[in-house]
Image: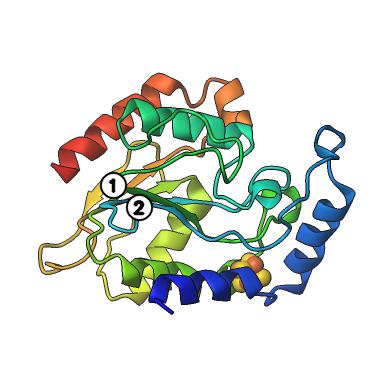
């Protein structure tokens, strides 16, 4: 079995966080009325995209009725609608929509993952749950030495990326989350990621209030392109 298959199997089988296991399964059992005919995934969600990607996008956690229903990162809810439409406009995705795992969506040069793999109550994983889950993120990063840009979506994902980078020996200054932040790592790190970026999470709350707009995401991914090229 190749390393990706082993990692995916380990993620899908994980039951390390009792609170999240109970919640993801409860949501999958009760379902939302609009999705009552769905067979919810109800398990941890592995990363999705191009294993050769140079852009790694890190989100928070599966949505209860989004990824926890469809089994694919950022798929089946408004956050995914916003993110994948932007990735499509920027040339990283072959289509602007993400409805279900078999909808034909393919990413090129981008990989989407999260700091927690199980849907949390109120979209808030506990610190110890993210600590438990960080090893999966570390294993994904280890399988993608070609990654050049890490884009963290939201404060929690940003903090998770900082912790992992420090664990990996990156000497980082104090960095404060802000949309559009771009930090270039010290050149002594010749291998591995070169840049860390941050953006508001594409949640409905952020898009409906105008805190995050399609134009802001287009500007951000244009900068990602410059950094990759
Ligand atoms: S959040 Fe991560 S560590 Fe916790 S049960 Fe889910 S997959 Fe396992």
**Disc 2 residue lies near ligand 1 with CB under 8 A:** no
Q: Is residue 116 visible?
A: yes
**Residue occupied by mark 1:** 109
Q: Position of residue 195 (x, y in %)?
A: 23, 52
Q: Residue at x 55, y 38 (%)?
A: 103
Q: Position of residue 224 (x, y in %)?
A: 25, 39
**Residue occupied by mark 2:** 50
Q: Nearer the viewer, residue 54 or 165?
A: 54
C-alpha span from label 1 to label 2: 6 Å
The answer to whether residue 21 is left or right of residue 48 is: right
Q: Position of residue 34 (x, y in %)?
A: 82, 32
Pointers 1 and 2 in contact (CB under 8 A)? yes
Q: Give the mark nearer the N terminus: 1 vs 2.
A: 2
The answer to whether residue 92 is left or right of residue 66 is: left
Q: Quadrant of the C terminus?
A: top left
Dot 2: within a 10 Å radius of its alpha carbon, few (fewer than 14), some, or many (20 or more) residues? Answer: some
Q: Nearer the viewer, residue 191 or 73?
A: 73
Q: Is residue 131 visible?
A: no
Q: Position of residue 42 (x, y in %)?
A: 73, 58
Q: Which mark is residue 64?
A: none
The answer to whether residue 123 is left or right of residue 200 is: right
Colour pattern of the rendering: rainbow
Dot 1: within a 10 Å radius of its alpha carbon, few (fewer than 14), some, or many (20 or more) residues? Answer: some
51 is higher (above) or lower (below) than 152: below
Quadrant for ligand 1 reads bottom right
Q: Nearer the viewer, residue 111 or 162?
A: 111
Q: Nearer the viewer, residue 116 or 69?
A: 69
């Amino acid at each position: 079995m190749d390393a990706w298959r082993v990692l995916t199997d380990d993620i899908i089988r994980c039951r390390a966080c009792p609170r999240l296991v109970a919640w993801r399964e409860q949501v999958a059992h009760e379902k939302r009325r609009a999705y009552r005919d769905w067979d919810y995934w109800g398990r941890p969600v592995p990363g999705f995209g191009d294993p050769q990607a140079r852009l790694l996008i890190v989100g928070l956690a599966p949505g209860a009725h989004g990824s926890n229903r469809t089994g694919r990162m950022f798929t089946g809810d408004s956050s995914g609608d916003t993110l994948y439409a932007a990735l499509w406009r920027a040339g990283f995705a072959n289509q602007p929509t993400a409805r279900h795992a078999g909808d034909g969506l393919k990413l090129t040069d981008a990989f989407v993952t999260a700091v927690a793999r199980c849907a949390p109550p109120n979209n808030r994983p506990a610190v110890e749950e993210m600590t438990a889950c960080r090893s999966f993120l570390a294993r994904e990063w280890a399988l993608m030495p070609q990654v050049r840009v890490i884009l963290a979506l939201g404060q929690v994902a940003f903090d998770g990326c900082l912790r992992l980078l420090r664990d990996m020996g990156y000497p980082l200054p104090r960095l404060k989350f802000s949309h559009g932040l771009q930090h270039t790592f010290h050149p002594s790190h010749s291998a591995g990621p070169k840049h860390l970026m941050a953006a508001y999470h594409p949640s409905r709350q952020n898009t409906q209030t105008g805190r995050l707009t399609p134009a802001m995401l287009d500007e951000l991914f244009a900068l990602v392109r410059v950094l990759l090229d």
